[in-house]
Amino acid sequence: MARFSTRVGRRVVLGIPSAWLILLFLIPFIIVLKISFSEIQLSMPPYAPLLQWVDGKLLTVKLNFGNYAFLFTDALYISSYLYSLKVAAVSTLFCLLLGYPMAYAIARSNPTSRNVLLMLIVLPFWTSFLLRVYAWIGLLKNNGVINNVLLSIGLIHQPLTMLQTDFAVYIGIVYSYLPFMILPLYANLEKHDLTLIEAAADLGATPFTAFRRITLPQSLPGIIAGSLLVFIPAVGEYVIPSLLGRTDQLMIGRVLSDEFFENRDWPIASSVAIFMLLLLVVPIMLFQHSERRTLEAGK
Amino acid sequence: MSARPRVDAPATAAVSSERSAAAGFVRIEHVTKKFADFAAVDDVSLDIRQGEIFCLLGGSGSGKTTLLRMLAGFEIPTSGRIYIDGQDMSTIPPYERRINMMFQSYALFPHMTVEKNVAFGLEQERLGRQEIRRRVGEILEIVKMSPFLARKPHQLSGGQRQRVALARALVKRPKLLLLDEPLAALDRKLREHTQFELINIQEQLGVTFIVVTHDQEEAMTLSSRMGVMNHGQIVQVGTPSDIYEFPATRFVADFIGSVNMFEGKLIEDEPDYVRIRSEELGGVVYVNHGISSPPEATVWVAVRPEKINLSRQPPKVAAGVHQPDESASENVVRGIVKDIAYMGDMSIYLVRAESGKTIRVTIPNVARHNEDRITWDESVYVSWLPESPIVLTR
């Protein structure tokens, strides 16, 4: 009986997330994949079915690769892709440069202040994401807080144009995603054995060398995890560039949404989505590879 | 106040030769280390000679590890000074000290191979690649780890990791090697084997070793001299046999080896012998050397279990030791065997004296089979020679 119930228990434990993923990820993904191979059609839904009965007897499959080909003919898609990758990469880099020292400081602080500091990192999540991005408009616009302060102390004589620039997008993304960099880095750095640093110092390594040769390589899994948690959503980011970003250069998330809702071209929108996914599979595979390696090294 | 024997004992000889020797290679002068209000190390002064294996022995919280960490430079003394090879170490950071440490956890770098771990220290000295390769190869040969140089630490056994840690510290050719509980993580058989290997390597390279341990057996085997620590202070410094045979305090006598301790009063105090009456023992102890202590003072008599005899008949007093008529009831008590533990090489007898005190006696098992052995519940005489008791005043 006991063995039977553990077997059932195990199935339930594994079954719930599996069912969740199949229902809410795999099936929608297949639907999107299917749409991406169909043709646009003025109907409800606005695309042609893939499978059709010819004369009520023969089932034919009509695959249309035209949507993918189209992505490469129109410069809009390519430039949006590249721009999105650039924005995501630069933002990830800045998140890392800002987040690493913060995570390091938290991990080395004493246990009581550590909890307070972690709380402060998570605190912004308590207000709406949208609201926080709107707040940046108030700060960055031409007669916003930052410009007014700089003008009043006489540091500048013309207001700086910050809103609707790459700079504003970087600020928005780095600000919003910083906790996703800090938390996995903290989780990694907090586990480090400090006697290793002492051992390095004992063997003649200066504090900087000890950091470079001992702490940094050991925190690589944390760096990878944090970077992917920032990079992957940043590539598809829609809200931040729409509110803070340029109007002459769209990110791929905005293009995707425009295709769906403005153009109502679902097949093209779906192929944009699938192509973006393919681009992100590479970093995801890298992530899994590093996860497996840490598992193996961790005994 | 100390109960130093007036006879020519090794303890006094060691003390005088220490004074006459030139200033120590490592000199610790009145070093105190406080954490908040707690003095982990309390006014310790110590001289350690070049080329010796010096063990710091003490229980947990005795301050031995803190003292070691101050030598390595990880802790800065609250007061006092440390000189190594004549140089004041107070302001020198760990990475500029020509001292290496072997950590209790070994602290091997998990992301580096054995070879990289050992090479790490030499790379910090900016040596050429050929030179590093040669020296790493040499030291791995000495610790017999050459076949494993491409392994990562998690692919090694405990004993192998210990060797790598030792190699990593020794490859820097330090003037002084600090070892924090070097053998604690090894199982018993391996530990015994490694102890002798450590001594061999030390003799081969001539490095001064300072070993911290809580294991008295380890300290006895390894050290040329040892210091016993308690509550942040050095209680006694001496060779292993000094400390075992001539402990300075009750703490040392009890901490090193096992001992039978009887409280008593000094009833006769002559330059060449003393008599002590002990209610606890239920008899009089006669010791054939004088002690410096006021009459009627409370003293403690410590007798090691292996220096005690068990017999069915009253023991015959060896001629010429002291007057037979006086000694009839001295250094002898009657008791009943309450327990025997067979240890293989010896047996431990627990004898209940008439006073109620339990006395521990060890008898070597010379014969494989002895029909006539003293056994449970037998009435026996417990006796010792007049030179065996240690008289302690504190």
Image (spheres, rainbow, N blue to C red):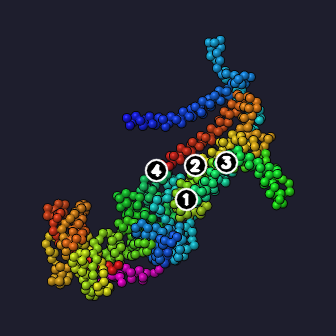
Badge 2 crowding class, 10 Å Cα cut-off, few under 14, some 14 to 19, many 20 or more, is some
* Secondary element type, mark 2: helix
User: In percent of the image, x 44 and y 34: which residue is there?
Assistant: A8
Residue B10 sits inside the magenta stretch: yes
The quadrant in which the C terminus of chain B is found is bottom left
Height in image: A151 above or below A265?
below
Q: Residue at position x 63%, y 56% from top?
A: A102
In the displayed structure, A7 sits above or below B79; it is: above
Give the residue type that dot 4 points to.
Gln
Which residue in the structure is indicated by mark 3?
A127
What's the distance in space between the residues labelled 1 and 4, CA to CA? 33 Å
Percent of width and height locating residue B221: 36, 67
Nearer to the camera, B23 or A248: A248
Q: Which residue is mark 2?
A: A221
- Cα separation between marks 3 and 4: 48 Å
Q: Amino acid at mark 3?
A: Thr
**Amino acid type, label 2:** Pro
Q: Position of residue A168 (x, y in %)?
A: 75, 48
Q: CA distance from mark 3 to mark 1?
A: 26 Å
Disc on res. B155? 4
Point 51% across, 70% down: residue: B35
Q: Nearer the viewer, mark 2 or mark 4?
A: 2
Q: Is residue A99 visible?
A: yes
Q: Is residue B386 visible?
A: no
Element assignment for label 3: loop
